[in-house]
Image (tube, rainbow, N blue to C red):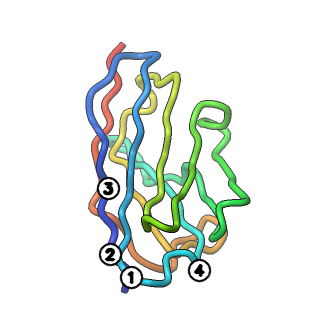
Amino acid sequence: QVQLAESGGGLVQAGGSLRLSCAASGRTFSSYAMGWFRQAPGKEREFVAIISASGGNTYYASSVKGRFTISRDNAKNTVYLQMNSLNPQDTAVYYCAGPVVGTTVVGSWGQGTQVSVSS
């Protein structure tokens, strides 16, 4: 069972940027797709972005496309989420997860990291 640990959340003003990191345990990290999800207060958890095992393919929710970038460093067992042009609607707990198949998590979830965007 892969173990995941997110970091990099915090409070930022609207228009600002944050980069989230997710460190994974295990020696097979480079063999599966990974994803980022988020859950805002009072709302269901939603898909944000996924990245293929090699990092060559990515897919984004329409709400973040063009503002967020998912990437991974397989040598470091880490997946990243660069978030630019943040707005208050991006306020949520962000989770990494993997492996994923499409936008379905078939493996583990991280503990989450809070991102708060002030107006």
Determine which residue is flagged by label 2. 3
Determine which residue is flagged by label 3. 6
Mark 2 falls on what kind of element? loop
Image quarter of residue 88: top left
| Residue closer to the observer: 56 or 88 | 56
Q: Residue 45 at what x, y percent from top left?
A: 44, 54
Q: Earlier in the sequence, mark 2 or mark 1?
A: 2
Q: Name the residue: 36% across, 13% down.
A: 119
Q: Residue 54 at what x, y percent from top left?
A: 66, 68
Q: Residues within 10 Å of mark 1 (few under 14, many from 20)?
A: few
Q: Disc 4 to disc 3, how far (Cα)?
A: 20 Å
Q: Disc 2 to disc 4, how far (Cα)?
A: 15 Å
Give the residue type at disc 4: Ser
Q: Name the residue: 59% across, 42% down.
A: 69
Image-based side of 113 in relation to 24, left or right: left
* Residue contact between numbered discs 4 and 1, judged by CB atoms under 8 Å: no
Residue found at the very far top of the displayed protein: 119
Give the residue type at disc 3: Glu
Q: Residue 2 at what x, y percent from top left?
A: 38, 80
Give the residue type at disc 1: Gly
Determine which residue is flagged by label 4. 31
Determine which residue is flagged by label 1. 26
Q: Disc 1 to disc 3, how far (Cα)?
A: 15 Å
Image quarter of residue 47: bottom right
* Residue contact between numbered discs 2 and 1, judged by CB atoms under 8 Å: yes
